[in-house]
Image (cartoon, rainbow, N blue to C red):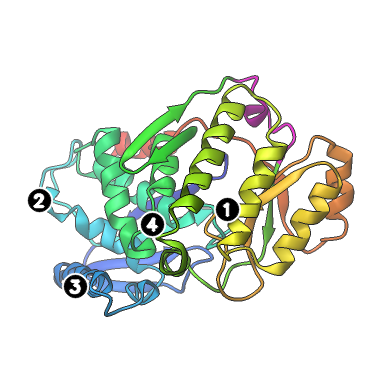
Amino acid sequence: MAVQHFTEVTFTPLHKTGGLFTAFESLSPSAFYPFEALRGFKEGLDRRFEEFMRGDMPVQKILQRPDDLAVYTLTSLLPMIPVPGATSKRRLPVPGQLSSKTDMPLGAGMGSSAAVVAATVVLYEHLLGRPQSVEERFEKVRFCERLQHGKGSAIDASAVVYGGLNRVEGDTVQPIHIGPDHSLSRADGWYWVQLGTPLSKTGECVARVRERHGSDTALWREFGEVTTRLEGIIAEDGDPTDVLRQNHGLLQRIGVVPQPAARFATAVEALGGAAKISGAGAVRGEAAGVMLVYLEDEGAMAKLMEAYPERRWEPLRVSLEGAHLSGEARVALSAE
């Protein structure tokens, strides 16, 4: 599910600097990546991923700095360079600063890293004058995201590239069409609540669950059945309370729901609703990241959150559009 919170990535030329500065808001201090080192940088991260695949390195050790994933994304586009830009006679990349800003919680299960990757891909597609198909863009985001999630699914990549609601099964992405009157389009009864930033990353959770439950075919069949029922209910804009509670119970069984999040879900259920973690959850610490909540009684939701004054929460509304070039950026490119 793509939600109406956005990450913007921009590029500002800084000639004669010989490389790329990063300035990712709320993510890290600025870093500098010299151009002559980019190809070796990418090869180094590819080797670290291969070490992870051989079991010689934990997934959370592949990336060494928070900015690495976005810069790796840029270097993955190097085979498209040098190519004259659609509106420029210069060869790219040119030295400059790659910046981002976002209104979504970072590292909390809302696909913030995938959003940065997708925005970087779209930005450089247009700077290079080489727009890709949405399928090619999805594969590029998925390829780069493997450094963050290891053997995780393509759920985040599908959300940020295709937008809307999608069912992801293996390599297949199937859109679930909803109209403007759907409760998710109107943010009616749906909310997201941030319950801290997990200590464990998505890749670490995936690896732990795979290690402990990977061969439990009955468990994964039950996950699949619950997902199919939820898909049908959402498509008909029905009441998802029961099936969301079942999904939450399965997530507790695989050990990714910290106790504070479980207590919060119990409080929501006592009011007649349901809650489940949005992302991978956590296998260390007490923070769960973002939880999705369905509770029809708007007043009851507001009253509940009075007990969590330090927690950010908002109605959840679906974005039907995936990563794209903003109107402001189109104007800037046209003016170049």
The dot on residue 152 is 4
Residue located farthest toward the bottom when viewing the structure as drawn? 56
Residue at 88% in and 56% down = 306
The dot on residue 82 is 2
Asked whether, in this view, residue 248 is left or right of residue 223, the answer is right
Residue at 65% in and 69% down = 287
- The residue that mark 3 highlights is 47
Mark 3, mark 2: which one is toward the viewer? 3
Asked whether, in this view, residue 129 is left or right of residue 82, the answer is right
Magenta residue span: 180-190
Note whether residue 14 is visible.
Answer: no
Answer with mark 3 or mark 1, whichever residue precedes in sequence. Answer: 3
Q: Secondary structure at mark 4?
A: loop
Q: CA distance from mark 3 to mark 1?
A: 31 Å
Residue 227 spot, x, y in % from top left: 53, 39
Q: Are marks 4 and 2 in contact (CB under 8 Å)?
A: no
- State the image quarter where residue 83 is shown: top left
- The residue that mark 1 highlights is 104
